[in-house]
Image (cartoon, helix red, strand yellow):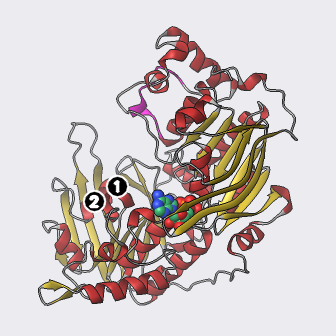
Amino acid sequence: MSNTSTTAGTIASSPSDVVVRLRGVGKTFPGVIANHDIDIDIRRGTIHAIVGENGAGKSTLMKILYGVQKPDSGTIELDGLPVSFATPSDAIANGVGMVFQHFMLADNLTVLENVVLGAEKLHGIGDRARRAIREISDSYGLGVDPDDLVANLGVGARQRIEILKVLYRGARIIILDEPTAVLVPQEVDELFDNLRELKAEGLAVLFISHKLDEVLSVADEVTVIRRGTTVSTVPAGSVTSKQLAELMVGSELPSPSTELSTVTDVEVLEVIDLGLPDPRGGRPLLDGISFRIHRGEILGIAGVEGNGQAELVEAIMGMRPDATGRIELDDGDIAGWSTRRRREAGIGYIPEDRHRQGLLLDAPLWENRVLGHQTREPNIAGPLIDRRGARADTERIVRDYDVRTPGIDTLARALSGGNQQKLIVGREMSGEPSLLIASHPTRGVDVGAQAAIWDHIKRARREGLAVLLISADLDELIGLSDTIAVLLRGRLVGTFDPSAVTPQELGSAMTGATDEEDRS
Ligand SMILES: Nc1ncnc2c1ncn2[C@@H]1O[C@H](COP(=O)(O)OP(=O)(O)OP(=O)(O)O)[C@@H](O)[C@H]1O
């Protein structure tokens, strides 16, 4: 098979052609059957979605198809011929490409340099490569300029470069892992237009998503995975998102309940004129940020990733010593306090990056329960760690938050992404915090678990919890928040009433496309 960028365009497109056929695919990890008896047909010229609960086995299956994991059983055929991939390079050489959720681009390089890195043999590193990139960008409507510096590009553009990278390497089957999780609605629409272009050119697009409405709007076929195996593949036009969710869990889901406001006038957090200089001398990372959150109130922060959300959270948590301004918790200025003291004062913290800040991946779940909470009950008895107390409370979290795991001695690394997240949320909600700083609390969790986490947060809010909610999921922001503020280039640029705003309006404010000052 050729590795040139034009391969895709020459494929004879017939919607009934099966390009990938998986039969009886299985994969077992110690103590866990991640996949068994997987049967899927992927047709060329179609968009095929994979849905399923956290831990159902979606990522494992994609990793098998991309050569990252080796299956224990079953067969994979490409165009009717059996294949076996020992590494991703094998998969790429056979026309299978993957776009991961965390982009792997070097900021300080141009688009061209990023694309040709590791693929210099195809079209060199100069004008021939530049022409090939332009050609691919034009034929799929990607709007990518090879000479742009990646550092200057937003999330949507970076994703298009990742897609271009796999096309450049000759991919005819493109796997995307939760591609919309980091995008605003306008970017989601653009991505879906791009995916439709790929399909029109005869490629097969395979993507994992937890957002069932999106799945139904763009996919041709949807495969549901439950407890490691394929339960059905249905045409997207033949099901509702509720029916899909029920296929995922194997039973009927309860309907969400509506909530009355629980906002009080007792202030929990007041941030006054918070600022953070850019260490490289550019525009401040945070500038003049002021807001209040009361008992029983959720303040949602909307924004395109990279507009100061991470810095805002880190400043409030005491991880940015150069932050200026005041941060008052229950009337006391905590601006000079350590992170640990802030946590002890009653702040729960769900970090954005669960691998870097939320978990010790090589420690068992119960030790992760203690992490960051080692000075508080039920984890201590006198000056010592109370193993029994910590273990019992980990069992409670596993039960209450439905963390799917063989046991609390399992290493955090072995949990699926969504189940890792449930463990962190459970830990940070324990000990009755007065303030919860929640960065993307349900990113990567399935619809059922998302509803359960929302219920936990709402219940705690009724009992007086104040929440600062940062999320890229606008439905989550609108559904949970009492007020939504938009963060753009380090400044709060407007506040919105969630009961009156649409995701499109929020998306426009987030990208600076409107100049509304205050709509609440
Ligand atoms: N490297 C590993 N070692 C041990 N167990 C693993 C490993 N990778 C995955 N598993 C287990 O395999 C099962 C399937 O996990 P997988 O990541 O494929 O699920 P998923 O459907 O992608 O979930 P999520 O939606 O939460 O990302 C889970 O029980 C998980 O704990």
| Left or right, 175 with reference to 431 | right
Residue 500 colored in magenta in the image: no
x and y percent of residue 32 in the render? 53, 68
x and y percent of residue 456 in the render? 48, 82
| Point 71% across, 34% down: residue | 198
Please, what is the dominant secondary structure of the magenta stretch?
loop
**Residue that carries the numbered disc 2 in the rendered image:** 314
x and y percent of residue 163 in the render? 58, 35
Q: Nearer the viewer, residue 136 or 310?
A: 136
Q: Which disc, if any, is residue 310?
A: 1
Please determine whether, in this image, residue 215 is positioned above or below residue 77.
Answer: below
**Residue 520: in sight, yes or no?**
no
For the residues labelled 2 and 1, say whether their Cβ atoms are less than 8 Å apart: yes
| Point 20% across, 63% down: residue | 318
**Secondary structure under the numbered disc 2 in the rendered image:** helix
| Point 46% across, 20% down: residue | 147
State which region is magenta.
145-154
Q: Nearer the viewer, residue 164 or 479?
A: 164
| Point 54% across, 39% down: residue | 86
| Left or right, 427 with reference to 175 | left
**Residue 97: in sight, yes or no?**
yes
What's the amino acid at mark 2?
Glu
| Left or right, 139 with reference to 279 | right
